[in-house]
Amino acid sequence: MGHFALDLAHLLAGGMVLVSFMLLYQNRMFGLLNVFALHALVLSASVAWQAWVQNAPHLYVTAAIALVLKAIVIPLALRRMVIRLEIHRTIETVGGIGLTMLMGIALVALSLVVMLQAAAEADPLAREDVALALSVILLGLLMMVTRYNAVSQIVGFMSLENGLILAAAGAKGMPLVVEISIAFSVLVAFIVIGVFLFRIRERFDSVDTHALDDYREGRQ
Amino acid sequence: MTSFLALLPFRPVDAVIAVPAIAALLLAALPGRRWSARLNVAASLLTFLLATTLLVERPPAGTYLFVDDLNVVFVVLGTFVGFTTSVFSASYIAHEIEIGRLTQGHLRFYHGMYQALGFAMNLGLLADNIGLMWVAVELATLTTVLMVGIYRTHDALEAAWKYFILGSVGIALALFGTILVYMAAQPAIGEGEKAMVWTVLVAEAAKFNPELLNVAFVFLMLGYGTKVGLAPLHAWLPDAHAEGPTPISAVLSGLLLNVALYALLRFKMLLAANPQTVAPGPLMVTLGLVSLIFAGFMLYRRRDIKRLFAYSSIEHMGLVTFAFGMGGPLANFAGLLHMTMHSLTKSAIFFAVGQIAQVKGTQRLSEIRGLTQSHPVLGWSLVVGVAAIAGLPPLGIFMSEFLIVSSTFARQPLLAIPLVFGLLVAFGALVLRLTDVAFGEPEGSTAPVEATYLPMVAHLALVATAGLWLPPPLVVWFQHVARMLG
């Protein structure tokens, strides 16, 4: 059981890193949303496995929130938004996909080196989990800086939050307060962003943050 | 006093958090009328009075809330600026409604959010739980994002979007740091709630894994540092200050930056309690100096008056971070004093700027001239405010800057060179801008100011008094806190 528990936890957390890489090279909006749903699905499985291994039933709640909200509700809502705003064309990225992927690999290497060393004495289950979670967080950040489009920036941000939940679930016995608040904050963040998107749409006729930059250049 | 407080049916520490929360709900639920601004003022005043009672009597530390010598300074200062800003905001908002920039519906939203922000900041300051503190800072970010975007113009939306994205990333990094602190604490303290309680953490910190704490501090520094507005993570700050309503600029500079700094200080104390960790000082000193010098140069190229003072906030927060990074009783004392003085001065300047922008109908520096002739009170208040923020004697900021510089000279003379350089650069920029705005030929509208001068004058009077004479009990208090900070 011991070894198997560890291996499966690593498999699932590693799966999240893999799906984060998949997010990086998506160049279609619907593809991006589908891969994000997959990201949330793997997160949900990973958290549920942690709940089982740690014998911490409250983590099942976190897993369920991830499954329902992030794997189903939010991708569907974003999909509707994309259709309504007619932005399902190719996503523009900063720099080439290849370069982004190389940077992603470097970030994962960095986080593994840093975390595995820093947490050398910690419980192995938590240690590798948090190292992989940091990779997911950094990849989410990378995605946010390499995309112009507001919807893909949101997806990047949510994948970053998925990494945070992975880290919180891995830290043994972390109080429930924090997890619920994370889920809640994602919801709030989503509403806020949604509101903003619609306003941005109203005012700029575009959800491409390029429009903001163009506007600013004109002003100065 | 103490016996009177014992008669109250609630603990003041709970009330400091509950009053803004209840007021936020009330103001959001009730239709916006003239008196909603008055209710806002009344609730802010009540919160401030309750906060001052924490100076005399404080409850024992609980799992969620606690009061100590450090956070009570922040709470009293914060609720005071919150109260004076609400007085300023009442007349400011009335004018905005008159000219049709805001509607009655906005008013309800604005006042509800104002109190929600007060709630979040007090909760963050009084929280005894690092998770709760994080939630409160996140809530404060969300409320200010919504208020920055309230005018719904191109610029306001851009500012809010930028603030939201950068703020969220910062807050996410801070959460990761918080999780790492929990992981470091958990083997020593055990699982569950207790390993996030700050008073327990700091008592047991010596037993934590030092390497994990080091990594955690880097994330906390970057995360909360984004909210402090430290360069190179400051990009949201000038936009958010320039495009939101001016009372919000005053609250952002006077309060929110301090709350983020407070969070940072708490974790610095945690690291200081563990002898094996890397000293967090150099990191804070570096980021502080970079912010100071960078903002000093950026001040020269500003065309918007609110943006100008936003960069000045980055400069001063950099200076405060530098002082706390240096550490030691004298530098910490100077840092605390500087933070207090900056909050008071900067919010007074924003009160003046808000009125100037309303009278002149513009925020462009080139279109505001000769204020001392057209609006003597406003013009001279701005002169005093800018003189104070630039660090001229005998005002309060001169004293704190002098202390920071002299303590740096005494301990690290080489660091004092870039420090003084940065201060001089910023000084030059402010004087350059001020001469045109305050003196020169009057330009634009000369309509009289309808708003109240009271909050602005009160703040400036406090700053001027502090420059000449600090009450001995306050000095003793700050010295004690400075020793606490290590």
Image: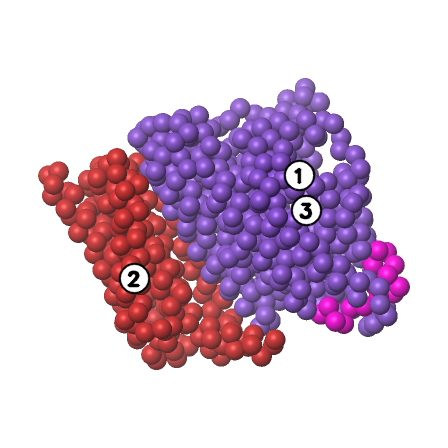
Chain colours: A red, B purple
Q: Which residue is mark 2?
A: A104
Chain ID at mark 1? B
Q: Nearer the viewer, residue B106 or B91?
A: B91
Three-letter amino acid code at disc 1? Ser
B91 lies left or right of B237: right
Rendered-image quadrant of the C terminus of chain B = top right
Against B450, is B173 above or below?
Answer: above
Residue A141 in the image, given as x and y percentages of width and height: 37, 59
The part of the chain drawn in magenta is: B364-380
Three-letter amino acid code at disc 2? Gly
Determine the secondary structure under disc 2: helix
Three-letter amino acid code at disc 3? His
Determine the secondary structure under disc 3: helix
Residue B21 in the image, given as x and y percentages of width and height: 57, 44
Q: Residue at x 42, y 46 (%)?
A: B218
Residue A217 in the image, given as x and y percentages of width and height: 56, 77
Q: Which residue is mark 1?
A: B406
Q: Residue at x 68, y 26 (%)?
A: B476
Q: Which mark is residue A211?
A: none
Chain ID at mark 3? B
Rendered-image quadrant of the N terminus of chain B = top right
